Each structure stands twice: as C-alpha cells, then as structure tokens.
Amino acid sequence: MGALMLQGTGSDVGKSVLVAGICRALANRGLTVRPFKPQNMSNNAAVTADGGEIGRAQALQAIACRVPPHTDMNPVLLKPQADRTSQLVVHGRVRGSIHGGNFREARKPLLGHVLESYWRLREQADIVVIEGAGSPAEINLRAGDIANMGFARAAGVPVILVGDIDRGGVIAAVVGTRTVIAPEDAAMIHGFLINKFRGDISLFEDGYRQIEALSGWRGYGVVPWLTPVKYLPSEDAVILERGAAKGAGRVRIACPILPRISNFDDLDPLALESAVELVWVKPGTPIPADIDLVILAGSKSTIADLAALRAEGWDIDLRAHHRRGGAILGLCGGYQMLGRRIADPDGVEGPAGAVDGLGLLDIETVLTGEKTLKPVTGHAMGGALSGYEMHMGRTHGDDCARPYAQIDGGTADGAISADGRVMGTYLHGLFEQPGHRRAFLERLGVASDGQHHGTQIDRALDAIAAELERHVDIDAMIALSAEARGNQGD
C-alpha cells in the first residue's frame, strides 16, 4: 500500500492521538502498520527494543500497531536541556547538542538519517502512518525542514492536515495554512481532519463545506472529543498546565512542575487510581501542606531544575513536609536532587561544577556523558515491577545500602532514607505493573484498584479506533496512502 502523513495547523492539535488511533484502526483491520515521526522535540521518551530511545508518543503508537517500539519510528529526537539548547538523539543514541543559533544548519544533514529509517519501515509494513511536528504554516522554519513538508516532499508522502476546533478559528487555521505555504507544499496536502469537536457535529456541516470550498481540499471527517484519551500517556508538558488535580481520592500526591520535567507519564497509573488525588503544583504556588506524598519527577537538566525548585521555594516546602511526617519519592533526576551533592565535572548539563542537593538522602551523584538505556524487571516493596532506566549519572552513598528495588540479575537500584520516608530510584514506568503499585499504595494506607495500566491503554486505543471508524473516512485514507512513492529514489 504505502504511507500517509498527518500534519497540523499548529502544535497540540491532537496529531499524536489521531496517529495512534488510526494505527490501531488499521491494525484491527488486519493490516501491518508502523508509526513514524521524522523529528520530535520532547523530554518524555521511552526505551526501545533495540536499546535506544524515542519520543513517548511514538512508543504509544507502536503499542497501537501491536509491535515493539523501535528507534526507526522516531529517528531524530530533540530533548530540551536548557534555554536554547537541546540534546540531539539520532537513531536512539545521543549525538551531542543543538543550539538555537545553529538549529537550522544542524538539522539539514539529518534528513538522510530520517529517510533511512522511513524506508526501512516501509519495507516492514502495509502502511506507515506519519506524524508531523508543529505546523507547515510555520514558514519561517521551512528552510531545511525535516519534520513536515521537507520530509513529505523528499519521501513523496501525501498529507492530511489536522485542525483543532476546540481552540477556535479552525476555518481560518485550515484555509490560512493553504494561503501561506508554498504551492509545491500545498500540493502535498490532499485533505483535512477536524479534531476535538464537542456537541452536535451536524451543526458544523456548513463550516466543513466552507473549508472544502475555500481550501480546495476534501474533508476526511470530524472527530468528536475523545474521552478515552485520559487513559493515554501525554508527551507534552503543556498538558500539565491545564488542570491542577486528577481524581479525588483519600491519598493526596503532589508533583511540582519543573521547567524541564521529563517522563511525567510515570505518574499516570497513580492518577487513575480511585484512592489517589494527583496534584500538579504549578510555578508560583506552594506545595500544599495536606499532601501525603511529594514526587519529584524526572528532569532533562537536573541541576537547572534544582535551581528552579529552590527559586520557587519548594525546597522549603519539601523540608516542612518531611518534618510533618510526609513521604517523598524522587524519580531519576528527582532522585538525584534529593541527595547531598550533584557533580558535573565534564559539563554534561552545562558549565562544569558541582551543587548542593536537597540533603534528604545520604547519596551523591556524578553526572557522566554515558547514557544508561535499558529495560528492567524486578521487585520493590514485595511487588513485581517492570520499567526502564534512561539517565546520565552514577549515584552512591550510605542510603544506597537500603535500595528501592531489587533488579532481576542480582543488582539493586535506588535508595531509602533511614526513617523510610524519603525514597529515590532511577526506574521509569515502575507503577505500570499492578504488583508494585499495590504494594506502594499499601504503604500509604490505601488499596489499589488492581488494574493493569497497559490493559487500560489498550482498551482506550480500541475505543479511539472505534470512534475514528465511525467519524472518519478510513477507507479513503487507505486509498490515499497508496499514492505514496513506492520505492526509495522513485
């Protein structure tokens, strides 16, 4: 068959979810499907079966296709480290950094890597479903583009444009995109999808036809607001700014939103527990005093985020919380922050040097250029867990003699304070398995619902796919995918 690309009228219009839903719908029809995103920018990443890392959204899309995630699904990943600087990951491995000043020039040579991955996936699948990044309407970024039209034209892939009606102005967004992009780019777009519609879809019939008339593109459907999305991990931290809390359970867990927070989807399984209320603490607000547990999530830049934490006064809140008998858990970068000292002798995160940590765990961390990327299984608190390590740095200290987890194969991970109330671990995804999550919540005095988080995600993907089958012309999309260039170099 071929390939199909979804691009958006802007960021956060729902492309990632739609690609996942289309992938699952096609897989449910018996097709072999692969997801692809040429270039992604996100600090939420996942470890792949081939030992690299890709954006979390592409890992979810792989689940939708019912295949293991692979580095070819997201060959270029940019992970923001500090202002104007991003870690560059190519084919799952760190390749240095890209700065705001050299971004356009540095990305041009990456198109070759992108096309290599794409053609490998094409050989494996009936259809490759591709997600763009940002919007093709960002014409100031068109030169050297590898994420949207630069890729689509190089690979000969037809495009469907996604507009978000929930944010308003969707007619202008779709038609305006046609107006501002080059005619050669506009020729790659074959139609549009309207996403996130609330209410009676028939009320938008006139607007839908006006978009068709003004743009010259056909419509592929209007997608209603998809409530099962709440069960899916989110890739972009912007979602955290939209709601202060999830759930209304008897245990309250708070997580401060640091500027470079990463892999915050580690908390999703806890947020879906009926006994848990998860409170996202926004900048400018204190950590509530009536919290049972504070979790410091992962960070792409531990030292910079530690400085931000102190600037917010959250270090004072954490110490007060601990004095009141509250519990604290640090995940990856958050684990490093809880120690006595963080050293960066080689300037991995910025200028070489060292800073004092929060001193709540008797550990020290040395940041190193070598990145640990591996899946793990083991036990913690009497419950089975599975997850992955993805970090730069080595941690040691007296509290490591009380490890958080025992890893299969005989190694230990993490640390627990002498009073048992401050914990840290390098493991991501540790709450997905019901065994460890149940044991962890029992320590907080509540029972777990016992659901397997992966099963919830799978059910949500099937529900989203069913909605797309009802509201989107999937048959026409399959037919359009056949127009993709058949072989490399055609």
Image (spheres, rainbow, N blue to C red):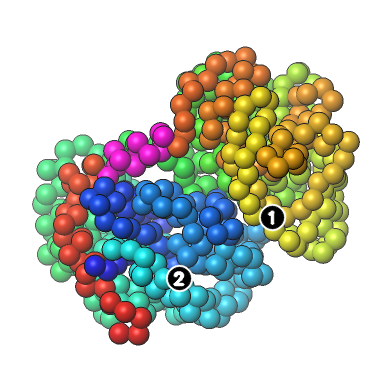
Secondary structure at badge 1 equals: strand
The image position of residue 119, as x and y in percent, is 39, 73
Write the residue at 41% across / 34% down: 455
Q: Is residue 73 left or right of residue 320?
A: left
The quadrant of the image that shows the N terminus is: bottom left
The image position of residue 287, as x and y in percent, is 66, 29
Q: CA distance from mark 2 to mark 1?
A: 23 Å
Q: Residues within 10 Å of mark 2 (few under 14, many from 20)?
A: many
Examine the residues drawn in magenta and state their main secondary structure: helix
Residue type at the position of mark 2:
Ser
Q: Residues within 10 Å of mark 1 (few under 14, many from 20)?
A: some
* Mark number, residue 227: none
Write the residue at 47% across / 65% down: 72
Residue 460 among those drawn in magenta: yes
* Mark number, residue 372: 1
Residue 102 among those drawn in magenta: no
Report the residue that reaches farthest toward the right.
398
The image position of residue 141, as x and y in percent, is 45, 73
Residue type at the position of mark 1:
Thr
Q: Is residue 159 left or right of residue 53?
A: left
In front here: 446 or 11?
446
Q: Is residue 406 left or right of residue 9?
A: right
Inspect this view and state whether residue 6 appears: no
Q: In the rendered image, which quarter is residue 140 located in?
A: bottom left
Q: Which residues are magenta?
A: 455-465
Q: Quick check: 308 above or below 277?
A: below
Q: Quick check: 306 above or below 171?
A: above
Write the residue at 36% across / 52% down: 65
Secondary structure at badge 2 equals: helix
Q: Quick check: 278 above or below 463?
A: above
Inspect this view and state whether residue 398 appears: yes
Residue occupied by mark 2: 117
